[in-house]
Amino acid sequence: MQAASSVMPLKYPMSVAVYPTYADAQRAVDHLADNDFPVQDLCIVGTDLKQVERVLGRRSWGRVLAEGAMSGFGTGLFFGLMMMVFMPALGATSAFSLGLLMGIGMGVITAGMAYAASGGRRDFSSVQAIVATRYEVLGEHTVVNRARQMLGQNPVAQPAPTQWPPTPSDPQEHA
């Protein structure tokens, strides 16, 4: 994991504005860029993170084995091509078909073993994501007031008086 300072190289970031969507924050930065603002002194940060898990459906033996066959199909294509190259005596069609069957078989067996080992826990499939519920435009302390003024001309902007992280009373003393 990267240190925050390498991802967000601002020395004393302060909040410029907070938006409900990433698109709104992006439009605000674009507005500043269109008006010759030094956007290299800004960052967009997703805040109030939440983990969301979307349940896609129930898992059954048939579905698990079908998914295993699908995942084994790609491996089987690779095996088939390798067998065609390294076992020309089998014939191209036979070598390719055998490799494809091996891959699909391995996918079905692996998926079946994993499902059986789960013992009925999590009999559903899902996808997970980490999402932000707010997006904050941060700026270097030296440009924040100008950015807030410029965004005040933009109806999308909601200037924020807060700062994150808190800056020292005299930024020059840390320079």
Image: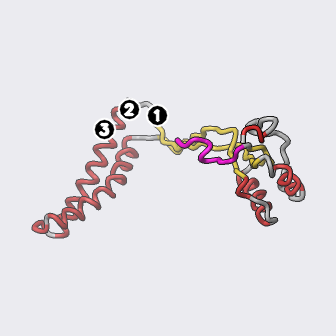
2 lies above or below 151 = above
91 lies above or below 52 = below
Distance from disc 2 to disc 1, alpha carbons, whole Å, reads 8 Å
Distance from disc 3 to disc 2, alpha carbons, whole Å, reads 9 Å
Q: Is residue 105 magenta?
A: no
Q: Is residue 6 magenta?
A: yes
Mark 3, other Cα within 10 Å: few <14 / some 14–19 / many ≥20: few
Which residue is the site of mark 3? Answer: 113
Secondary element type, mark 1: loop
Mark 1, other Cα within 10 Å: few <14 / some 14–19 / many ≥20: few
Q: Position of residue 105 (x, y in %)?
A: 26, 50
Q: Residue at x 54, y 43 (%)?
A: 2
The dot on residue 118 is 2
Which residue is the site of mark 1? Answer: 122
Q: Is residue 153 left or right of residue 22?
A: right
Please state which of residues 66 and 14 is positioned toward the viewer in this rendering.
14
Please state which of residues 22 and 6 is positioned toward the viewer in this rendering.
6
Q: Earlier in the sequence, mark 3 or mark 2?
A: 3
Q: Residue at x 38, y 49 (%)?
A: 67
Q: Amino acid at mark 3?
A: Met
158 lies above or below 167 = below
Please state which of residues 46 and 101 is positioned toward the viewer in this rendering.
46
Q: How many marks?
A: 3
Segment colored magenta: 1-11
Q: Residue at x 36, y 52 (%)?
A: 71
The dot on residue 58 is none
